Image (tube, rainbow, N blue to C red):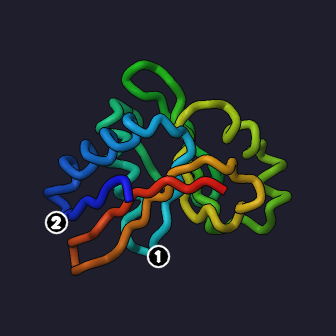
């Protein structure tokens, strides 16, 4: 386990996002998988993380477009994927998911199990667990296949 971050409430989210950013910076791994039950707060966490990275754009779930692109404070792309509604791995291939994953830029991937065969072997897994009405526990670990 690389990090375990407890979030007591939504008010604590910015501090938690800074801790997550520090962990991601230290690991230098651009592929970040986000797992958690529906409604656990994966997109909310991504929104806070993007704010910590200096993204000025509105960060929202790319549920229907599958991928949104943002720019960080250094004008580098951040790719945000939501594969919840994807029909097949082939659909992800058609939108060029592999090229995004191989770009070296930060890829934040919700519902990654739906595109498992396309994911690079070296990646970080961020698990969001619901611990109360507003509280969450975020666990970060490195995965290597």
Label 1 packing within 10 angstroms: few (<14), some (14-19), many (20+) = few
Quadrant housing the N terminus: bottom left
Rendered location of residue 115, percent (x, y) = 72, 61
Q: Nearer the viewer, residue 43 or 34?
A: 34
- Secondary element type, mark 2: loop
Numbered label tally: 2
Question: Where, by quadrant of the figure, is residue 55 drawn?
Answer: top left
Which residue is disc 2 drawn over?
9
Residue occupying image coordinates x 75% and y 43%:
98
- Residue that lies at the very extreme toward the bottom in this rendered image: 132
Q: Nearer the viewer, residue 51 or 142?
A: 142
Is 58 located above or below residue 73 in the figure?
A: below
Residue occupying image coordinates x 44% and y 57%:
141
Is 41 located above or below residue 28 in the figure?
A: below
Q: Nearer the viewer, residue 4 or 130?
A: 4
Residue occupying image coordinates x 42% and y 45%:
59
Rendered location of residue 91, percent (x, y) = 81, 57
- Mark 1 near mark 2, Cβ–Cβ under 8 Å? no
Question: Where, by quadrant of the figure, is residue 10 drawn?
Answer: bottom left
Q: Earlier in the sequence, mark 1 or mark 2?
A: 2
- 129 to the left or right of 84: left
Quadrant housing the C terminus: bottom right
Label 2 packing within 10 angstroms: few (<14), some (14-19), many (20+) = few
- Secondary element type, mark 1: loop
Q: CA distance from mark 1 to mark 2?
A: 18 Å
Identify the mark at residue 38; answer none if there is no mark. 1
């Amino acid at each position: 386990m690389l990090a375990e971050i407890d979030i007591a409430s939504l008010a604590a989210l910015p501090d938690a996002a800074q801790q997550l950013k520090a962990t991601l910076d230290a690991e230098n791994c651009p592929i970040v998988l986000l797992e958690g039950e529906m409604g656990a707060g994966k997109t909310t966490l991504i929104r806070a993380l993007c704010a910590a990275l200096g993204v000025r754009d509105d960060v929202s779930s790319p549920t229907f477009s599958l991928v949104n692109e943002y720019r960080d404070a250094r004008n580098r792309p951040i790719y945000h994927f939501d594969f919840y509604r994807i029909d097949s791995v082939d659909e992800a291939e058609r939108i060029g998911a592999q090229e995004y994953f191989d770009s070296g830029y930060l890829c934040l991937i919700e519902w990654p199990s739906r595109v498992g065969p396309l994911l690079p072997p070296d990646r970080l897994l961020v698990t969001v667990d619901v611990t109360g009405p507003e509280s969450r526990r975020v666990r970060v670990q490195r995965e290597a296949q």
